[in-house]
Every structure is written in C-alpha cells, then in structure tokens.
Image (cartoon, helix red, strand yellow):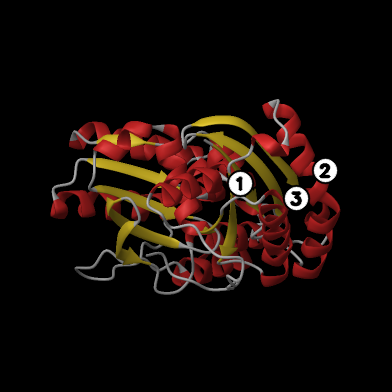
Amino acid sequence: MNVLGIETSCDETSAAVVSDGRTILSNIVASQADLHALYGGVVPEVASRKHVENMIPTLQEALKTAHLSYQDIHAIAVTNRPGLLGALLIGVSAAKALAYVLKIPVICVNHLEGHVYSNILTEPSLTDAFPILILLVSGGHTQIIRMNGQGIYSIIGKTRDDAAGEAFDKGARLMGLPYPGGPNVDRLASSGNAKAVRFPRANLGDTLDFSFSGLKTSIRTFTAKDQGATRMEDVAASFQAAIVDVLVEKLKTAAERSGITTICIAGGVAANTGLQKAMRIMAINQGLRLVIPPIELCTDNAAMIAAAGYYRLQNNLADTLDFDTLANSPLG
C-alpha cells in the first residue's frame, strides 16, 4: 500500500510516499529556514504563504521521485494537529482535495505521533517490542512517552514550562548565534569544553518532568556578565550539556522504573549530536536497546506522517473529510 504523506505544521512543506508503512519511496522537504532566518524565527503568516507556493511542486516532486502517479496512491495521511493553524490548513486542504478527487481514504495524524513513528519507520521490528519508551524532544515539546501498542500512549514525563528545543533556540539567540539556534549550538559545542561553565540542572524531585526556564535565565545572566570573555565554543558546550544531561538522566530513570529495555528518541532535538552520543553511552552502560532515526527523519518530514497514517489505516482509523485542524492537541 502506497501512502502519500503531507506535513505543513510549521515552516517545512513536505510530501512523501511510503510503502506498507516501512519503505520510503520519496521524502521531499521544501525548507523555509533561510527565509525565516531574516526575522530570527518563524513568522506564521509568512510560513503559510510559502506553503501555498510550495505545495503543488513538492507533491509533484514526491511522486516523481517515487516513480508513481496519483493513481498509484492508496491513501493520504496529513498532519492536522498541533501546529500553526494557517500552516496546517494548507496541507489539510490539499489532502482533502486529493482524497475527494481520487476517492481514497484520508487519515489525519497528530504531528507528535508522526515523530513517534519516525522510530518505527527506522526500525520496523519495534512493532514487536512493545512496550517501548520514546523521548520526544523538539522546539515545542519535551516528553517521555510509554508506547504500549499501536496508537496506545501514556505520557509519563513532560516539561513544566519550556521545551528543550525552545531553550536551545533562545539560548543561541542570547549567545548571538543565528537562526536556527539549536544546530548552531551543536556545531560550536563539538569543539568546546562542556565543563567550562556550570549551568544549572533543574531538580524536580522524584518526577520524570522537565524544566528549562531556569536554564534560559542562567544563560541570559551569564552572557550579560561575561561579555564575551569565555570562548563561545565552551559556552555552547556547557549550555548544551546542561540540557543533554537532564534528558539522558530522565530517560534512564524512566527505563529503570518501568523495566522497559527498548528506548527511542524523536523530534528535531534528536538530531543533536551531543544528545545522540550521550544516549548511546547511557544505553550501552544500562544494557538498553536504543533507536535513533536518521537526521532527515528527526526534523519535520512527511515520511513519518505517512508511516503513522499507514498504521492508523490498518487499525481502521481512516477519517471523514470534515475533520478539523487544531493548534494544540495532546498525544493519545
């Protein structure tokens, strides 16, 4: 079964074709990063207008790369929540129109569930390993998810204020780094001393929750006092370590408490090389199986949406054409 995925939740226009929920035939992403870099962050109205321009060419490129036509598509999966409403509406409108004309099923997918399925797309055997733990860490979300089966989730840890990706981006801005901040912090941190500056790690007692607002305050205070005296590489490495240490420790604790031995990371921050290295070391030391998607599946993409849509369709969860778009929506 060939599922066409469409993803427009933020500033990436993406279309992909995935066969049987596991084989990527195409995964096209039209990035707006250079455009939004002019403003230091994503401008919703600009993103929506760019999605309109990019949608048809991106769909055509996805089909061309897959060597298929619209008549070869059996279902359409589209992100309808959460995200920027204007941006979501562009993808949803395209999906509904195509599903209506082609007379094929349409499946609306939670963007967070798409990130979860980036791991299953990477390692299909995970469907035989439930329950598993997923650390979903992005610009808008930081949570530990226990996945007990297809579409069965429980959130066992979450951020109480800011997401890790937001902390990366705002910390980068305070360091004077360009947008997007997270990748630039990661690049500098690779040649820095992570022990040069002792940034705080939030202690939330005996919980699996996260908090990064205090870290943002700390980097603001430090940069104002330091005035560039400390090597930027060392500041970046120390700041990154303060985020990574907490993420790794919380997922480790979740695995210990639950007895679950398969762990995954997903979301844009999962592409961070410092986080990946620390997670691999922890997994080896704890005897855990770790799955990390390739970078192209960590960031927003339509292949993960198509994969999630395929499994929802297998569970008879196709939608009617009157489904809504939602700016906020929890997983599960």
Q: Position of residue 157 (x, y in %)?
A: 31, 64
Q: Amino acid at mark 2?
A: Pro
Q: Amino acid at mark 1?
A: Gly
Give how far apart the Cα atoms at labels 3 and 1 are.
Answer: 21 Å
In primary-sequence order, the first of circles 3 and 1 is 1
* Nearer the observer, 271 or 182: 271
Image quadrant where residue 194 sits: top left
Q: Is residue 92 left or right of residue 113?
A: right
Give how far apart the Cα atoms at labels 3 and 2 are.
Answer: 18 Å
Give how far apart the Cα atoms at labels 2 and 1 are.
Answer: 14 Å
Disc on res. 244? none
Residue occupied by mark 3: 33
* Nearer the observer, 247 or 144: 144
In primary-sequence order, the first of circles 3 and 2 is 3
Q: Is residue 46 left or right of residue 145?
A: right
Q: Is residue 133 left or right of residue 82?
A: left
Say what secondary structure mark 1 lies in. Answer: strand
Quadrant in which the C terminus is drawn: bottom left
In primary-sequence order, the first of circles 2 and 1 is 1
Q: What residue is drawn where x is 51% and y is 56%?
A: 138
How crowded pointer 2 is (Cα within 10 Å; few <14, some 14-19, many 20+) is rated as few
**Disc number lying in front (3 or 2):** 2
Residue occupied by mark 1: 5
Say what secondary structure mark 3 lies in. Answer: helix
Q: Position of residue 153 (x, y in %)?
A: 31, 59
Residue occupied by mark 2: 57
